[in-house]
Amino acid sequence: MKTYAPKLKEIERKWHVIDANGQTLGRLSVQVARLLIGKHKAMFTNNTDTGDFVVVVNAAKIRVTGKKTTDKKYFRYSGYPGGIKSVSLGEMLEKHPTRVIEHAVKGMLPNSRLGRAMYKKLKVYAGNEHPHQAQVAGIKEPDKGSSGK
């Protein structure tokens, strides 16, 4: 028996809208990464981009537990001596709330050309409005799990 490998023309991409209002950052990021990779589909293969498009709205209303707003830091380095900069999660949520979710999801995707292609299908917006109304018309939000919330 041969192993099934999906062709690019066989892959059906759907659009998912996820409301981040009140959801925990890590749990939301896992859900989004799973949809981008395509693990929820029966035709999933790890060497093909079988994932769907994901639109995350209300990124500014994301929730974190503990003291992460002050203790969690995002670092960037310019390459020069003394050129390391750090920003706390609280500051990042105030200035660029979309980057918090993008950074968390990007870390869960493969570090390859394939992962970069998957990442391009992620659209994150701080507010409730997004310009993808035509693509997601008639599509309902994915299940939030069996936690009963």
Image: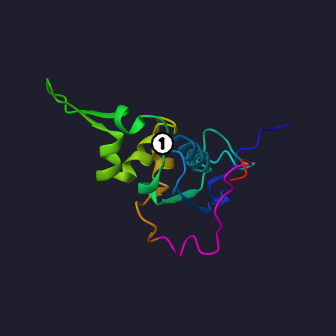
Tell me which residue sits at (51%, 57%) in the image: 21
Element type at mark 1: loop
Q: Does the magenta stretch include residue 45?
A: no
- For this orientation, the residue located farthest to the front is 66
What percent of the width, then of the height, locates residue 102?
Answer: 43, 47
Question: Quarter-wise, where is residue 129 in the image?
Answer: bottom left
- For this orientation, the residue located farthest to the top is 81
The residue lying toward the viewer, choosing from 55 and 12, is 55
Q: How crowded is mark 1: few (under 14 residues within 10 Å), some or many (20 or more)?
A: some
The residue lying toward the viewer, choosing from 6 and 12, is 12
Looking at numbered disc 1 in the image, what kind of residue is underneath it?
A: Val
The residue lying toward the viewer, choosing from 10 and 67, is 67
**Residue 93 shown left or right of residue 20 in the figure:** left
Q: Is residue 34 above or below residue 55?
A: above
What percent of the width, then of the height, locates residue 75?
Answer: 30, 33
**Residue 40 shown left or right of residue 86 in the figure:** right
- The span picked out in magenta is 132-145
Tell me which residue sits at (47%, 48%) in the image: 119
**Residue 10 shown left or right of residue 52 in the figure:** right
Residue at numbered disc 1: 64
What percent of the width, then of the height, locates residue 39?
Answer: 67, 44
Tell me which residue sits at (85%, 37%) in the image: 1
Tell me which residue sits at (51%, 74%) in the image: 133
**Residue 75 shown left or right of residue 142 in the figure:** left
- For this orientation, the residue located farthest to the left is 81
Magenta stretch prevailing secondary structure: loop
Rendering colour mode: rainbow
What percent of the width, then of the height, locates residue 59?
Answer: 44, 55
Q: Is residue 45 above or below residue 136?
A: above
